[in-house]
């Protein structure tokens, strides 16, 4: 799969930036599915793995190219693992519509804070999960599946402006700050997506 185009099966600009930055060492030409006219797939799976496979397979089928897809979200223990696979659609699932991704992120964060109102700091444990799937073609029987987990806590108010999604609410104990206060290099080195991508980099067909 080296020295060829790989479709990134995502329309999330924040994810695309992180994937481009980390995967640039693989010697492949990464191209967004939107640049190739691929619509988002219906995420009908019940797990991060299922949804990542659905998105990657859809991109392969439409373009005829290999594809990489990411499915990720945040699991909050006090909410029995919610919002989980519905993280990006947390507020939308309650009937709210949004003009853009920023509005959606703000609504998701506001809803998460509302759901955790009154929950003490010690019980606000959470983790980001990320699954990245690489398919050589739509019928690939042996997809490459990589997974990363990032443990932390949910803050009582947003902090920082870097990153996207739930980053302003996700407290990183090892760095004593919100994820949204970390610079990109630091975040990529320790995040759930960074971990999964490092696995992908190590498992990528040689030579790198």
Image (cartoon, grey):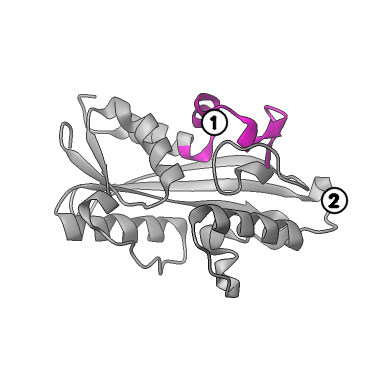
Q: Alpha carbon of mark 1 to alpha carbon of mark 2: how far?
A: 26 Å
Is residue 167 a member of the stretch shown in magenta? no
**Secondary element at tag 2:** loop
- Name the residue rendered at 62%, 58% in the picture: 108
Q: Which residue is mark 1?
A: 187
Q: Where on the picture, by quarter, is residue 103?
A: bottom right
Position in image of residue 123 (x %, y %)? 79, 50
- Which region shows up in magenta? 170-193
How far across and down, in percent of the image, does residue 167 sit? 61, 43
Residue 124 has which mark?
Answer: none
* In this view, 143 is above or below 27: below
Q: Is residue 137 visible?
A: yes
185 in magenta:
yes
Tell me what residue is drawn at x 18 percent, y 32 percent.
2
Sequence order check: which comes first, mark 1 or mark 2?
A: 2
Q: Find residue 181 and report its image quarter.
A: top right
Image quarter in which the C terminus is found = top left
Q: Which residue is mark 2?
A: 120
Q: Nearer the viewer, mark 1 or mark 2?
A: 1
Query: At which x and y percent is residue 95?
Result: 57, 75
Q: Is residue 9 above or below residue 5?
A: below
Q: Secondary structure at mark 1?
A: helix
The answer to whether 104 appears left or right of 133 in the picture is right
The quarter of the picture where the N terminus appears is top left
- Rendered residue at 60%/29% (across/down): 182
Identify the residue at image location x=46%, y=43%.
Answer: 14
């Amino acid at each position: 799969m080296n020295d060829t185009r790989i479709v990134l099966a995502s329309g999330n600009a924040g994810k695309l930036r992180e994937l481009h930055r980390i995967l640039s060492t693989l010697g492949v030409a990464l191209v967004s599915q939107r640049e190739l006219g691929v619509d988002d797939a219906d995420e009908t799976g019940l797990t991060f793995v299922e949804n990542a496979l659905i998105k990657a397979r859809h991109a392969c089928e439409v373009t005829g190219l290999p594809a990489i897809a990411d499915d990720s979200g945040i699991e909050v223990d006090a909410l029995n693992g919610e919002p989980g696979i519905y993280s990006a659609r947390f507020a939308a699932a309650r009937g709210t519509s949004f003009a853009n991704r920023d509005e959606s992120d703000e609504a998701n964060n506001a809803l998460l804070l509302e759901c955790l109102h009154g929950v003490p700091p010690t019980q606000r444990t959470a983790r980001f999960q990320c699954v990245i799937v690489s398919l050589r073609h739509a019928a690939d029987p042996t997809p490459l599946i990589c997974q990363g987990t990032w443990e932390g806590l949910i803050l009582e108010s947003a902090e920082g402006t870097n990153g996207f999604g739930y980053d302003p609410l996700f407290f990183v104990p090892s760095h004593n700050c919100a994820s949204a206060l970390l610079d990109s290099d630091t975040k990529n080195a320790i995040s759930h997506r960074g971990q999964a991508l490092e696995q992908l980099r190590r498992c990528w067909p040689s030579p790198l």
